[in-house]
Structures are given as structure tokens and as C-alpha cells.
Image (cartoon, rainbow, N blue to C red):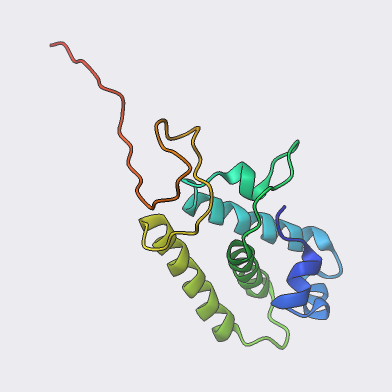
Amino acid sequence: MLVTVEELGQSDLYPEIISKITRGSDTEAELQLATAEDIVKGYISKYDLVALFGNSTTQPIVESLSIKRIIKTIAAWFLIKRANPNVNTELFYDDYKNAIKWLEDVQAGKINLQLPYCTDAMPGVSDANDGVYFNSLPKQTNFF
């Protein structure tokens, strides 16, 4: 995963709050972080996800603090939805809505992250990060 439970505890939720919500188990927090990461990947799939997130054999080669921030925001919302000891849920819900809006703007091309594009999924697209993206289906011939 791109974001660890320790990183989440250093920025969005205090470690003791995470411990209360998860009852001392990091597994629940890791599950929410993995879910948030999957949501983010769905929105930014036109970028090179292996370069950003890595995989089982490769470490990430590009660091994006904004992507990490969005993952932490979404994961924090998912955690406090489970149980909210001493946390202002409205503040976190507003952050969650803003994070999703930001991801929608990235997906729509309104925000260019200056990250490498996934060239495997888009033949003919260079890594120029010029903000132009197009795609089409292969030509089909139908007979009746």
C-alpha cells in the first residue's frame, strides 16, 4: 500500500483514535487504506498506476503527495464512520466530499497532476503530460 497506518496516524487521525476505532488491530485500518487506494486508482486510471503505487514486484517510482493526501482523507472518513469517539464527523465528511470532487476533476481533465500516463492502455500516447487524452474502440465491420 502507498500509505501506512503510521502515516495516517501522523496526519489525519491521532493514533489513539485509530486504535480505539480498530480496537488495537492494524488490520482494519489497513483494509480502509486499501479500499481508499482502490477508489483513487479508479479515478486516476489514465496515469501509470504501477509508477504511482507499485505492485508485488515493483516499488513506486513517482511520489505524489496529493494522491497520498486524498487516500488518507478517504480512509479517515471510512474509519470514523465505523465508530466516532471524540471526532467531528461533519468535518471529515466535508473533507471526504472535497476529496471525491478533486478526484472527479482529475478524471475529467480539469486538473493535470503532471504524472506519467499509462502508455500500455493508451497506444500512441506519449509521456508528454500535455493534458490531452483521447481513445477509441477498434474499428468493427458488421455484416447483415
Left or right: 45 with respect to 79?
Answer: left
Q: Position of residue 92 (x, y in %)?
A: 58, 80
Residue nearest the observer in this picture, 48 or 42: 48
Give 24 or 1, whichever is nearer the viewer.
1
- Residue drawn 37% across the image and 57% down it: 109
- Of the pair 44 and 111, the residue shown nearer to us: 111
Q: Position of residue 138 (x, y in %)?
A: 31, 24
Displayed quadrant of residue 107: bottom left
For residue 116, above or below residue 136: below
Where is 60 relative to 3, above or below? above
* Horizontal relation, residue 31 to residue 20: left or right: left
Q: Position of residue 51 (x, y in %)?
A: 63, 45
36 shown above or below 141: below
* Residue at 49 percent of width and 59 percent of height: 113
Q: Residue furthest top?
A: 143
**Residue at horizontal 61 percent and vertical 71 percent from the top:** 73
Which residue is found at the position 63% from the left and 42% from the top?
Answer: 50
- Left or right: residue 97 versus residue 142 is right
Q: Position of residue 80 (x, y in %)?
A: 66, 75
Q: Number of numbered discs present?
A: 0
Q: Quadrant of the C terminus?
A: top left
Image side of residue 18 versus residue 138, left or right: right
